Amino acid sequence: MKSLYSRLPAVHRLLATAEVRAAIAVFGRQGATNACRAALDDLRTAIANDTVTGDNIDHQIEDLPQEIGHRLQAGMSQAYPEVINATGIILHTNLGRAPLPQPMPELLGSYLALEYDLDRGQRGQRLAPLQKRIAGVFEAEWAVMVNNNAAALVLILAGLASTREVIVSRSQLIEIGGSFRLPEVMAAAGAVVHEVGCTNRTHLRDYAAALSEQTAAILLVHQSNFRITGFTATPELADLAALAREHDVPLLVDQGSGNACDLSRWGLAQESTVSGLLRAGADLVCFSGDKLLGGPQAGIIVGRRRWVEPLGRHPLYRALRPDKTALVVMDRVLQAHQSGRLEQIPIFVLLATPVESLRRRARALGRRLRKAGVPARGLATRCALGGGTTPDETMPSYGLAIDGGQRLADGLRRCALPVVARIEEDRVILDLRTVFPRQDRALETAITSAWDPALQ
Ligand SMILES: *Cc1c(COP(=O)(O)O)cnc(C)c1O
């Protein structure tokens, strides 16, 4: 057995092989040396375990340089690889929600006046420069931005309702993906949940009866990823706002999506907008930055100055504040909203693409695929906004259907540029609404490489 160990090459010999020398050029000498040592250690362990023996050790040693190259490659691959989203879900939370405008602002590679008052040459306020722009876009008195909407809700509740009661309807105690459960978030922020009404019906009188000395706020939550239909009731926002004002407590709305537009222009049903909610009497509205606003991950709180301004000074704000990347990209996205240039924001480009243009791309792609032996057919599809924004609504789209089911879908996910698709009745459906035209060639390559006629 001892002789087996002595047959392992020395590190410097491995470093001199053509494969490892090529790897050094890309990954550096230190990394390559570490990879050599790790590969040799693994072989020693395998010898000790008798999985490598006199019969197969030559093979193992021969493969070492290649194995070291693979290890380095795997270690350097991107933690978050780019994917082609062929699901037709525009705001796919697992795929990063809203794709960001390109190119990224160059100033991020430089120093910037993040918290610096250039007039006075002193430390400035981090949020002040963006505050006015956010308030402007949403027609609000004041605005605060934090890391995400969950953080926004925590800050509001900790700032305005700590150890006191927040009245919320039983129909709005939501759970959304990624472990956001409203009652738990509220409890973690120190608020006492006071549930009112029934799952399907909550009346103004339910809220009125729950108001007491202990009440800190009334909270409305967008149902986001589900709908309650049938025998239902919810009070008008204006009536609730009047009730809240009578008792001098704020009316909070977790609006969720940050909708700033009239969705009907893309053929979707109209959703309430953030500014509409404020006009109807909400005192504070919070929402995500990376849903229908089309920006980076963020939580935005807008509303009456009396309630919103103190939140920016709350000790928790320091823990929840956004980083410069989010602030700079959000600034850019809000500028696009302000000037009505939505075509600068990728989700609106996807939404605005006419079905006819998707059909044309599908036809061209299908033709090339069939030439390569893949039986792809064009197919009218329905796509969705996603992100819990409009759960029961879809819009017309177009894509490709390929028989091949789970096997083909698995293969597509494992391509060099992975493709995420959906499966319907054992067919892989690739919706082109969420595929950027610049990705069409890569999509074609992925499909032809994942397609294996032997498996059909
Ligand atoms: C999406 C959503 C959240 C969570 O927002 P994050 O930005 O992911 O933290 C909270 N409430 C509602 C109503 C939502 O739709």
Image (tube, grey):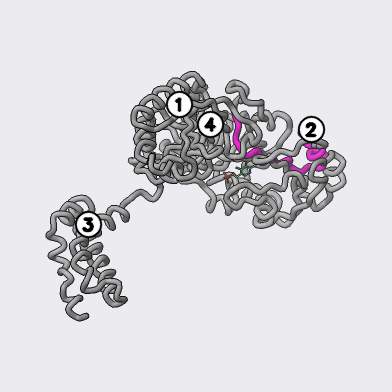
Indicate whether residue 374 is drawn in magenta: no
**Residue placed furthest toward the bottom:** 2
| Amino acid type of the residue that numbered disc 4 sits on in the rendered structure | Arg
Q: Which residue is mark 3?
A: 66
| Amino acid type of the residue that numbered disc 2 sits on in the rendered structure | Glu
Give left or right: position of 449 versus 223: left
Q: Nearer the viewer, residue 383 or 91?
A: 383
Q: Which residue is mark 2?
A: 236
| 318 in relation to 440, above or below | below
From the viewer's perspective, is the residue at label 4 or at label 3 nearer?
A: 3
From the viewer's perspective, is the residue at label 3 or at label 2 nearer?
A: 3
Q: Which residue is mark 4?
A: 133
Q: Which residue is mark 1?
A: 344
The Cα–Cα distance between marks 4 and 1, rounded to whole angstroms, is: 17 Å
Q: Nearer the viewer, residue 111 or 217?
A: 217
User: Neighbour class for label 2 at 10 Å: few (<14), some, many (≥20)?
Assistant: few
Quadrant hosting residue 198: top right
| 42 in relation to 185, above or below | below
Q: Are marks 2 and 1 in contact (CB under 8 Å)?
A: no
The Cα–Cα distance between marks 1 and 3, rounded to whole angstroms, is: 45 Å
